Every structure is written in C-alpha cells, then in structure tokens.
Amino acid sequence: MKTLKDYNFKNKKAIIRVDFNVPLNEKLEVTDATRIQAAKSTIIDILEQGGSCVLMSHLGRPKGFQEEFSLRHIVKSVVDVIGCNVKFVADCVGAKVEEAVANLEAGEILLLENLRFYEEEEKGAISFAEKLSKFGDIYVNDAFGTAHRAHASTTIIAQFFEGNKCFGNLLAREIESIDKVLNNSEKPVLAILGGAKVSSKITVIENILDKVDHLIIGGGMSFTFIKAQGGKIGNSICEDDKMELALDILKQAKAKNVQIHIPVDVIAADDFSNDANTQICNINAIPDGWEGVDAGPKSQEIFDTVVNQCKTILWNGPLGVFEMESFAGGTIALGHSIDKATKKGAFSLVGGGDSVAAVKQFGFAEKVSYVSTGGGAMLEMLEGKTLPGIEAILK
C-alpha cells in the first residue's frame, strides 16, 4: 500500500483529492470542520517536505455552477484549520487554473473550485480526469468518503500517475482500521449494528458473520427479528418482507457459532415525539399503539457485559432515536460501555453517518480508537467490496 512515506515531495506539486463536503449554514459558513481537520496531517506532511498542495473536492450536489456550492465559502475554515494561507481559483480546469498552478511555489496551497460544477466529474469522464492530472506531479487520494465512487477525481485520474500515486494519511488510516476489524482482529470480535432497516445492512451482516464472535442487533432493525420470531412489537418499525431473511441470519449465526444479542426490553412511546408518554416493555410484548424507540435498561446492562468481554469492536448505527433527548439513553449507555472497553485495551471503530453523529454529539469521539469519516464507503468495505478509489491506487 503506497502512502506519503513512499515519496519525496520536495519541489513537487501534489494534487490531492480531499473530502471537503462540509455542512454550511444559511450564511454559507462552515458549521462542522471535521472533514477539513481530517485532511490536515496529509497537507502538513507534504508542505513540511517542501512540496506544494493542489486541493480538489466537491461540495453538495450542484446542478452546474451554483454560487451557494462554491468552495470559496470554505476557504476561511481551511485557513483556520491548516494554519496557513490558502489560495483559491474560481474553476477546477482551464487556463485560469493552469496559471494558478504554474505560479504555485513550494510550501503553498491552492484550492480548486467545486469539481461537481462539471457533470464530467460524476460521469467519470477520462478527458476531464486528464485535465485535472496536469495540475500535479503526484496524485494523493485522501477522500475516503468518496472512495466508493468511480468519479473522475477519485478513481479515473489515477491512471495518469503510473508510479506516482498514493494514499493520504486519512485514507491509509481508514483502510488499516477497517482491515484491523475484518482481517487482523484480536478476539473476541463484536459488531454492533443499529439503525432502522435490516435491508440496508444485509450484505454487511452476511460478510461479517465469518469474522465476529458476537453481533448486537439494535435500533429499529431489531423489531424485524423479534416479529419474525413471533413477538408482538406494537407499532414499532418493521420490514415484514425481510422477516424470513432475519430468521435465516439467526440460523447462519448459530451454524457459525456467532452469539447474536437483540434487546430484551425497550423504551416504548405512544407517539414519535420527544414529549410522548413512555413505558418500559419486554421487546416481544409491546402493546398496540406503542412503538419501541430505545433500548431498555436490562438491554443496556446485557450489552455492557458483551462489549466489555470483547477486544475488537465495530459500531455502526444507533440503538434508538438518539436525536430526541428522551430516547438517547441506550445509545449513550453503549458509548460509555465502548469507552470503558477501549480504556482496557480494546480496539473500537465507529462508522456510519448516524453513529458518527452520535459519538460526536455525546462526547465519545475522542474516547474510541477510530471514528471513520465515510458512511457509504465504510459500509461497502464491510460488505467485502473493493472500492474503486482504493483499487485505482493499488493498481
């Protein structure tokens, strides 16, 4: 796996695919600079070697040029995070960019305009990728969040850098962390899968059953498993067409000697609202008119025991509707359990949009071993797929 350590960037221009697809408020100010922060070490490493950095990214899903999606709005945040001046050019291909790149000196950073202002980016157009390739001596992919897309800047461009392409620090860490869980894990290994739907996690479950000792199934998807086994789940979310599949997963797990843990009790609410009336119910005896919205106290205790006997922990998806304060208890309790296990030496990896949002919201981001920056990309890796953006560097 080629990384920054394999190259000398002195007097070289690195063209770096970063993931600066950050959230902006109504004033077009960055509200969360985590993704910029994640790229910092790659940029600093190259600058300290005497190289220069040409940064390219997308922002949002623009239809052609739309001012609100211009990367000029994030320049101040990039300067604040990286700690040095950042030049900006209001295009990502063409004469203006050629001139700006030609004038870029060692130790300087240039940020190109939003790649998705050109439809050729998402189409993976070879001609567009070739134009981008002219702006660097070495191609560095540091955008894990888009590594599962075969776009011009994430995948196609790599073919123009034979022998001069590598992973940035962030992408290298992502690959190593996921590989550590899937292929080089210390046992016992635990996967915690939450969220609303079984359907979105089927291939993940099937791929990891051979690699884990314990599997906690929480959140909304647990009700499909409970109903499939004859439990009464009231008005709880359920994918009726996936019940047979849920039974099949339980059967596969048993055959592979994987212990599956599903909540035994839940906080049930009479309305999908933070102010709803609530009661604690056995998960297989939820009254009509009530729906399960969080893991109950007994489940939290059981999960704590399971988490703290494991040496490798993967967490993808919350245990309840954590966005509502009343139903965040199960997810917070799980965060505390993983924090405790990590302090005792377990390796803990958190990934997937909702679980990442939860660990940030409740202050666990610094207390786990690694927080992944890519939701869709991480899920595809857990499914056993090779991502095009990673494959392009490995070729």
Image (cartoon, rainbow, N blue to C red):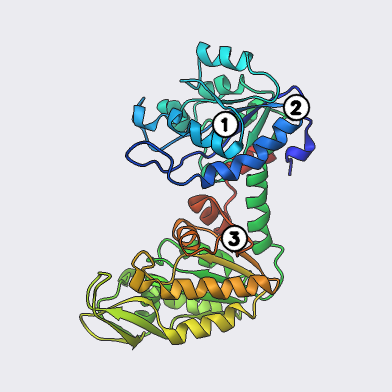
Query: Disc 2 to disc 3, how far (Cα)?
Result: 31 Å
Answer above or below: position of 383 versus 164: below
| Disc 1, SS | helix
Q: Quadrant of residue 7?
A: top right
For the point 46% across and 40% down, which residue is it?
Answer: 21
Look at label 1 and name its amino acid. Answer: Ile
Lower position in the chain sequence, tag 1 or tag 3: 1
Residue at the spot of label 1: 156
Q: Is residue 27 visible?
A: yes
Q: Residues within 10 Å of mark 1 (few under 14, many from 20)?
A: many
Look at label 3 and name its amino acid. Answer: Glu
In the image, taking residue 63 as reference, residue 172 lies left or right, namely right
Residue 158 is situated, as x and y percent measured from the top left of the image, at: 63, 31
Most foreground residue, 156 or 2:
2
Residue at the spot of label 2: 50
Q: Quadrant of residue 321?
A: bottom left
Viewport quadrant of the C terminus: top right
Look at label 2 and name its amino acid. Answer: Gly
Residue at the spot of label 3: 366
Instruction: Judge depth for marks 2 and 1 and give the one in front.
Output: 2
Most foreground residue, 246 or 47:
47
Query: Disc 2 to disc 1, how far (Cα)?
Result: 27 Å
CB under 8 Å between callouts 2 and 1?
no
For the point 61% across and 69% down, which residue is it?
Answer: 313
Q: Quadrant of residue 271?
A: bottom left
| Rendered image: mark on residue 206 | none
